[in-house]
Image (tube, helix red, strand yellow):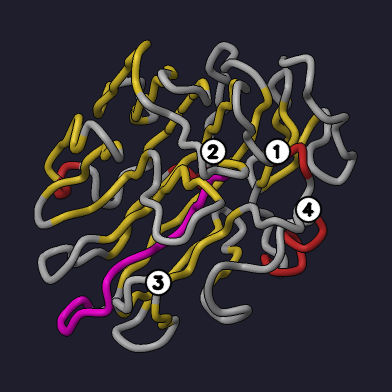
Amino acid sequence: MDASTPSPDVGGADATATGACGPSAAAPGTVLQLRASGGDPYAYFASKNLMPIDGPSSGYITDTGCSFKFVLHQNGAEETVSSGAQRQRNELTVNPGNPAMYKGTQGTTMSYTWRFRLDVMNADPTWCDIFQLKPHGALGVAPYLALQANKGQLQIEHFRAGDVRMVPLASIMGVWINVRFQVKLTDPGAMSISLTKDDGSMVMSYESDSIDMWEASTDFVRPKWGLYRNKRDGAGEAAIEYDDMTIIRGPLGPPPTRPACACAK
């Protein structure tokens, strides 16, 4: 953990977090751990000092008891971004008023883990981001890294290097995927990301020890879990489930051992 790490806030992560599949020990350095349990997701996120949502403040996220389900519809959740383009957004993120311990700053190593299952997606009319590592600062800055559904692919997209890895979108639809992502926030920096299935098989991965992961205009960096896309005719419904979302100040530890759970089906 970096020497400048803020002291953990007891509201962010407990030694263990209990969800639908029982208690889960937090990895060293964990400052935020989110697990579905069947309650009101907006109240739960507020209890973790994570409000406001980037998107509608109600009705677009549900806690199924096994996951947090995020949706978009053909209409609604719309905004005009700094370029003048029409977008749709439903994302959980870290905003300026949220705790400092959730924010990645220059020179720090941050790690993020989560599970997701993509249930409904039509990425032919337009791309749709399902995760972003986004700098906060200047308007209109691209995410440093995004997981993006685009046409028939799920791709890892870096703001300088472009699409560094991709797999057929059809190969991961309806399948629980575990993501582990570590980043050193410098220029040049370093990053590693892996996507695996519950049986341990690799979906895709990427690693670099010399890659741009910081811009001078950046105040801090934050994860964005959810759906973000162009407003485009024919995009229709989109739905994705997440669980076990964590923010870790420092490097990733060993992967957790997951007990058998009906929620994984």
Instruction: Please name the residue that numbered disc 3 is placed on.
Output: 82
Whichever of callouts 3 and 4 sits on the residue coming sooner in the sequence is 4
Badge 1, how many Cα within 10 Å: few under 14, some, many 20+? few
Q: Which residue is mark 1?
A: 22
Q: Residue at x 56, y 41 (%)?
A: 221
Classify mark 4: helix, strand or loop: loop
Q: Between marks 2 and 1, how big is the CA–CA gap?
A: 9 Å
- Amino acid of disc 3: Ser
Q: Which residues are magenta?
A: 222-235
Residue behind mark 4: 48
Residue 179 image position (x, y, % from top left): 43, 32
Which quarter of the rendered picture does the C terminus lie within?
Answer: top left
- Judge whether residue 224 is colored magenta: yes
Query: What is the three-letter code of the residue carrying label 1?
Result: Gly
- Pick whichever of labels 3 and 1 is earlier in the sequence: 1
C-alpha span from label 4 to label 1? 19 Å
What residue is shown with label 2?
Answer: 261
Q: Secondary structure at mark 1?
A: strand
**Circle 2 sits in a helix, a strand or a loop, which is it?**
loop
Name the element at disc 3.
loop
